[in-house]
Amino acid sequence: MNSDIPKLEDPAKLPLYCQGLTRFFTEGGRRLEVLRGVELSVSPGETLAIIGASGSGKTTLLQLLGGLDKPSAGRVQILGQDLGSLSNAECGQIRNQSLGFVYQFHHLLPEFTAVENVAMPLLLRRDSISDVQGRAETLLERVGLADRLRHRPGELSGGERQRVAVARALVTEPAVVLADEPTGNLDHRSGLQTLELMLELKEETGTSLVIVTHSGEIAERMSRVLELEGGILREVITPDGVRGAG
């Protein structure tokens, strides 16, 4: 167990909580343990960075936290609901209602316009058609893309595509956004703009933000920093003795 990770008393009230999270793979008759008993509590509105070397299991952890993969042992709870106790359909519903995802590569649907991509999570949630369009357009205007609403991903720059992806992740006002190297495919300026945008929007919605990153500059902007090493997640202590970077 990772005893140095602070835990709150009532996980049922947390946007995101995991306990004893373990993931291993079998390769050539050998067992490869990627995660070992990971524990994590994310408070409402908290910003958190997960750092670690390439291949340390950061993306695997994010997939487990988002219900995109199943742990070998342990559990993940979103707003008190244990993902392991849900059917695939129920888990998908939780993802669409309570989680947002931002990836290094935008994963926008190429045949749809920017506004249609942002509206997609709302449509999957079966929100009112009359409400969906307005909300998607308003959020795209908020991220500086008022003149790009009808453009398809191929007609947008890399930074613009990532802004659409951020808007799509936050349009449902999720409890948690999970971001996997969201600035990793952008130049330095576009990366910082994307980070600022995510932080501004999450403040407006009260969303918690968990970012996997190699960037020390991004990690320093988060309220807590955790490092994944040898399958174990530990809180980083900064030189001044403060936990995390906030």
Image (cartoon, grey):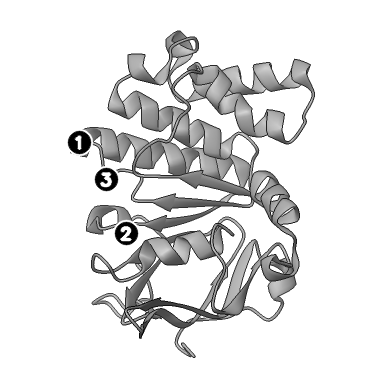
Q: Position of residue 6 (x, y in %)?
A: 52, 81
Amino acid at the residue labelled 3: Gly
Mark 1 → mark 3, Cα distance in angstroms: 8 Å
Which of the 4 quarters of the picture holds residue 189?
Answer: top left
Q: Position of residue 144 (x, y in %)?
A: 43, 20
- Is the residue under label 2 in contact with that under label 1 (CB below 8 Å)? no
Q: Which of the two residues, 8 or 109, is positioned nearer the viewer here?
A: 109
Instruction: Specify which label sits upstream in the sequence, 1 or 2.
Output: 1
Which of the 4 quarters of the picture holds residue 212?
Answer: bottom left
Q: Is residue 239 left or right of residue 57?
A: left
Amino acid at the residue labelled 2: Ala
The number of numbered discs placed on residues in the rendered structure image is 3
The local secondary structure at tag 1 comes to loop
Task: Identify the residue shown where x is 60% and y is 22%.
Answer: 136
- Few, some or many residues within 10 Å of mark 1 (<14, 14–19, 20+): few
Which of the 4 quarters of the picture holds residue 85?
Answer: bottom right
Q: Position of residue 57 (x, y in %)?
A: 36, 69
Q: Which residue is mark 3?
A: 184
Instruction: Specify which label sits upstream in the sequence, 2 or 3.
Output: 3
Q: Which residue is mark 2?
A: 219
Mark 1 → mark 2, Cα distance in angstroms: 17 Å
Q: Position of residue 230 (x, y in %)?
A: 31, 82
Q: Is residue 89 shown to the viewer in this render? A: yes
Mark 2 → mark 3, Cα distance in angstroms: 13 Å
